[in-house]
Image: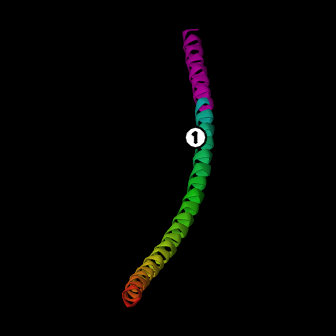
Amino acid sequence: ETAHKTVCNKNEKLETAHKTLHDKNAHLKAAYKTVRNKNAQLETAHKTIRNKNARLETAHKTLIEKNAQLETAHKSLRDKNAQFETAHITLWDNNAQLETAH
């Protein structure tokens, strides 16, 4: 009878331990699913960021090229302005000579 009682107690402890392990396993499965979902979200976010980065790099390259064009146009306008200033001085000098001769 004592041996039977000991076996019953041991069996109850084993059943309790089994239930605890079963509950812990369910908890770990849920945690694993949560981690997997979060990982999928992070992978999607990473892909989005990579795509955005590629677009920004393309836009940056475009802006650099546009800036170079604008610098070239600016230099051309400065050169043209210098030519107009020289022509303007020449016209003033010619006008002064004509007024003197007149």
Q: Residues within 10 Å of mark 1 (few under 14, many from 20)?
A: few
Would you say 64 lies left or right of 51 here?
A: left
Percent of width and height locating residue 6: 54, 14
Residue receiving disc 1: 35
- In the foreground, 72 or 50: 72
Please state, as top left, top right, bottom left or bottom right, where the C terminus lies in the image: bottom left
Please tell me which residue lies in front, 33 or 44: 44
* Position of 49 relative to 80 (above/below): above
Vertical order, 18 against 60 (above or below): above
Q: Magenta part mainly helix, strand or loop?
A: helix
Q: Position of residue 79 (x, y in %)?
A: 43, 81
Q: Is residue 98 left or right of residue 55?
A: left
66 or 61, which lies in front? Answer: 66
Looking at the rendered structure, the secondary structure element under dot 1 is helix
Identify the residue shown where x is 38% and y is 84%: 96
102, above or below 25, in the image: below
- Identity of the residue drawn at 55% across and 9% down: 2
Q: Position of residue 51 (x, y in %)?
A: 60, 59
Q: Residue furthest bottom?
A: 101
Residue type, label 1: Val
Display coloring: rainbow
Q: Quadrant of residue 92?
A: bottom left
Q: Say if the magenta span includes residue 80.
A: no
Check the image and report above or below for 74 versus 97: above
* Residue 72 x, y percent position in the rendering: 47, 78
Q: Which residues are magenta?
A: 1-26
- Give the residue drawn at x 56%, y 63%: 54
| Quadrant of image for the N terminus | top right
Is 10 covered by the magenta stretch? yes
Looking at the image, how many numbered discs can be counted on the residues? 1
